[in-house]
Image (cartoon, rainbow, N blue to C red):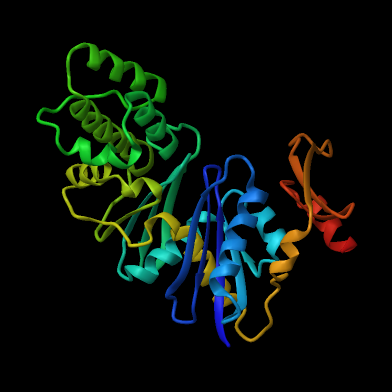
């Protein structure tokens, strides 16, 4: 039986599940809205994966990433749990080995990752402001009555440039409404928004950094051809969109799992383990002035995982129990 490696990326907007083979070829990829229910979204993805693999593949390793990586890791028995920066960089290097600059825009955050000799040398994340992220574009598409799938293509039909204030979601929306009242077309306003979002991204994340090609753009927003065109206009260079741009974090997690399990058995709990009821809760630790919010997960009344404490005290207690 051939080996497959699973990668799971749990974000605030979407949950992605992929499977790759020994050569790194993608066997399966699945995207589902998280909708505030990461446990259910992970279960859905794994159930789809089980049906796809049937009994022809042996799950030899599992990796998780994203903001819900610890929870997903507990659910499936992950061999490796990694941050998004590492996972995205590893996946990009797989598809574009000489990549130097990675633009990543997801549902509610954005990142820039600089790579040299296939190693991450610098990065920055924006998790504070939603301006320029997928959720903001979704909202604007809905407000303008346009399918998000058509958003970018419509932007490319604009005949005139219009400048939209893109530094803040509130200002951007107000400015768009004002420009509509001035008589600009939807295509011109959307095109202006795409350019504003890229300007905002570059000002927040790329300022002071030396950006070099090849440039790769990934994340769900990479499907928007208007944003891609705005990036290329801003940097004056072609931007590469990988085939699996929307699930690159999950692919990276799967690749890391493949590397992690060499010479040993996987910790994968099996597909049947997803029937287990995982109960998350949280509390504020009063052990010091940090006042960390600690996340706790119970299975059958027993605490199986805790995280969020900066000092690691609660995580260590769980390790001693289980």
Instruction: Say which residue appears at 75% left-offset and 59% top-offset.
Output: 275
Coordinates of residue 238 in the picture (x, y in percent)? 19, 55
Q: In this rendering, is residue 117 above or below 200?
A: below
Instruction: Say which residue appears at 61% left-offset and 40% top-offset.
Output: 36
The quarter of the picture where the N terminus appears is: bottom right
Coordinates of residue 121 in the picture (x, y in percent)? 41, 59
Q: In this rendering, is residue 43 above or below 194?
A: below
Relative side of 50 to 161, left or right: right
Does the image show residue 149? yes
Relative side of 133 to 301, left or right: left
Which corner quadrant of the image does residue 95 belong to? bottom left
Does the image show residue 117? no
Is 188 or 44 nearer to us in this picture? 44
- Farthest left residue in view: 159
Coordinates of residue 127 in the picture (x, y in percent)? 50, 38
Coordinates of residue 158 in the picture (x, y in percent)? 14, 32
Instruction: Say which residue appears at 67% left-offset and 77% top-offset.
Output: 266
Relative side of 276 to 224, left or right: right
């Amino acid at each position: 039986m051939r080996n497959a490696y699973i990668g799971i990326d749990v974000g605030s907007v979407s949950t992605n599940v992929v499977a790759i083979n020994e050569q790194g070829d993608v066997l399966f990829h699945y995207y589902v809205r998280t909708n505030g229910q990461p446990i259910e979204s992970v279960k859905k993805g794994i159930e789809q994966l089980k049906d796809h693999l049937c009994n022809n593949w042996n799950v030899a390793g599992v990796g998780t990433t994203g903001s819900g990586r610890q929870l997903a890791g507990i659910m499936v028995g992950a061999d490796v749990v990694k941050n998004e920066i590492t996972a995205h960089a590893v996946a990009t290097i797989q598809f574009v080995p000489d990549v130097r600059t990675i633009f990543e825009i997801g549902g509610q955050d954005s990142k820039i990752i600089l790579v040299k000799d296939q190693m991450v040398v610098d990065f920055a994340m924006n998790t504070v402001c939603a301006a320029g992220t997928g959720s903001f574009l979704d909202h604007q598409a809905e407000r303008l009555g346009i399918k998000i799938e058509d958003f970018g293509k419509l932007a490319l039909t604009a005949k005139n440039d219009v400048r939209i204030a893109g530094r803040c979601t509130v200002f951007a929306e107000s400015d768009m409404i004002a420009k509509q009242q001035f008589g600009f077309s939807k295509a011109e306003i959307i095109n202006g928004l795409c350019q504003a979002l890229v300007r905002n991204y570059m000002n927040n994340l790329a300022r002071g950094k030396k950006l070099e090609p090849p440039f790769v753009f990934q994340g769900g927003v990479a499907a928007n051809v208007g944003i891609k065109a705005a990036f290329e206009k801003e940097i004056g260079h072609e931007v590469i969109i990988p085939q699996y741009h929307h699930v690159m974090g999950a692919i990276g997690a799967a690749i890391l799992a493949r590397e992690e399990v060499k010479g040993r058995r996987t910790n994968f709990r099996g597909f049947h383990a997803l029937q287990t009821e995982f109960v998350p809760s949280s509390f504020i630790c009063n052990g010091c002035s940090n006042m960390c919010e600690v996340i706790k997960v119970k299975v059958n009344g027993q605490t199986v995982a805790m995280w969020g404490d900066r000092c690691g005290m609660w995580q260590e207690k769980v390790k001693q129990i289980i």
